[in-house]
Each structure stands twice: as C-alpha cells, then as structure tokens.
Image (cartoon, rainbow, N blue to C red):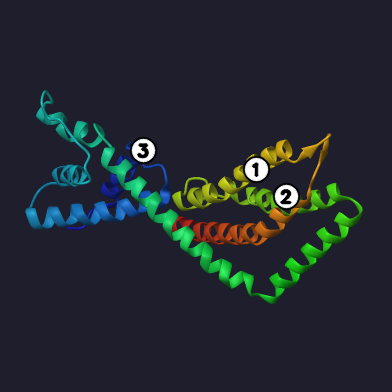
Amino acid sequence: MKLTKQEIQFIDNYLIKNEVKFWDVRIELLDHIVSAVEDKMTNEGISFNEALLDVHRSFGNQFIEFGVSKDKIFEKGLYQSNAGFKKFIRNKQKEIGRKNRKRYWVIFRETFFLQKFILEYIVFILAIFITYQYKPKAAFMIALLALVVPELLKFKYVFKKGVRHSLNANMVGLLNTSFLCFQGMFLDFYKDEFTYNGIIDYRYIICFYVLVYPLVRVSFNLYKEVLNTTKERYKLLIS
C-alpha cells in the first residue's frame, strides 16, 4: 500500500521533531521508514499509525505505555524517545568518516603524481628557499600563508544552500578544521621551544610546513569534492 503525500510529509516532520537535523540523513531515514511502513500496512493489514509506531520502535526508540491513554499512544510514542535515531546518526558519522579518510588517500595518490602539482610544489619550495636566504621570517610567512589560505577559502562553501545542514558536509569540514587547529597548537609550541634571546629559529617549522603542504592541498581538494557533490544532490532534491 502506497502512502499519500500527506503521510510522507508527516513522517518527514516527525523526523525533524525527533532532532534528525541533517537533511541527507533525514532523506535516507525517510526512504527507509516509508518503505517499512508500506510493507507493514500491506502485509500485516494494520493502520498507518500502528505501522509507523512499530517502525519507530524498531530503531531502538523506547516507549513506556504505562499511564498513557490509548488515544495518546501514537502521539506520545513517536516523540517520547529518539535514542535510536541518535545511534543511527552516530553510526553514519563513523561511516562517513571512514569513507572520507579512504577517499583522502585516493586523491593524495592522484594529486601527488600530477605534473601540474609537481611544478607547483617545486615553485613553492624554491620560493621558500630563496626568500629564506635573505629574510627567514618572510619565508616563514610565505609557508604559513600557503597552508592557511586553502583553509580560509573553504569558508566560501560553508554558507551555500544545502551545505550547512548536511552531515556529509559537516564531517568533511570537521576533518579539515582539525588540521587547522593542530597547526595553531604546533605553532604556539614551536615559538616557546625554539626562541633564543627573543629570536625564533624558523628552519624546522618551515621544513614542517613544506612537508605538509601536499596534505593541505589534498585536504582542500577533498573538501571541494564532497561539498560540490552535496550541493548537486541538494539541487536534485528540491528541483
């Protein structure tokens, strides 16, 4: 038995009230719940309310019926607990995290052997090396900017429609932000440990930035890929 548009919309609103805030997770759950409810109504001959409540419980959302009147069981049962949905979202986060890490190293291998990137990397290293001969601090600033600018460019994607409330977009953003935080902590540590008589020894931190430059570039490429895919999927959804 096929559900009506009103019933499907009810399920979507019910997921929103149960704090399934990421639209891509909600679409996945909506498809699953609609199919499960239709199967129960067809095979078991039960009503929409009974089928939806059964499916709700099947996710691990607990409901205590004691003290609840029969006419309130459906309403109370759907919103008393969302523990099952929270667990589902946590599992999706782990799944997406694994997928992003795997994809990261695929992009890394593809990027590292591109002639365009090799040339870019050589120019970057030469610019740092030449500048360091005359002004070490300027060389450090070039290296730092080369790593920070890609991170800042990511913000132009953050406010795109359909991105902010996507779990996929949030997860790849978290992966990239963690690198920026680590870089800031490392810089603070380095300034404390490698400052002599008020003068910072920039050699080691510049070498560190040169080594991690490919990782940052690949991180940016992964970020763009995931967010562009998310935007396209959102456009298809609302069109």
Tell me if mark 2 has few (under 14), some (14-19) or many (20+) residues whose alpha carbon lies within 10 angstroms of its own.
some
Res. 236 in view: no
Q: Most extreme residue toward the front, as rendered?
A: 196
Please name the residue that numbered disc 1 is placed on: 186
Relative image position of residue 188 (x, y in whole percent):
69, 38
From mark 3 to mark 1, how far is it between C-alphas?
Answer: 37 Å
Identify the secondary structure beneath mark 2.
helix
Q: Is residue 202 left or right of residue 167?
A: right
**Mark found first going from the N terminus, 1 or 2:** 1
Is 166 rendered above or below residue 63? below
Query: Nearer the viewer's eye, disc 2 or disc 3?
Result: 2
Please name the residue that numbered disc 3 is placed on: 19
Query: Is residue 168 or residue 107 the one in the foreground?
Result: 107
Q: Residue at x 10, y 30 (%)?
A: 70
Query: Is residue 179 or residue 90 the one in the foreground?
Result: 179
From mark 1 to mark 2, how far is it between C-alphas?
Answer: 9 Å
Is 194 rendered above or below residue 233? above
Query: Is residue 134 or residue 57 the one in the foreground?
Result: 134
Report the number of discs: 3
Relative image position of residue 148 (x, y in whole percent):
70, 49
Q: Is residue 98 left or right of residue 17?
A: right
Q: Residue at x 19, y 36 (%)?
A: 62
Please name the residue that numbered disc 2 is placed on: 205
Relative image position of residue 193 (x, y in whole percent):
71, 38
Q: Amino acid at mark 2?
A: Ile
Among the 4 quarters of the image, the one containing residue 127: bottom right
Tell me if mark 1 has few (under 14), some (14-19) or many (20+) residues whose alpha carbon lies within 10 angstroms of its own.
few
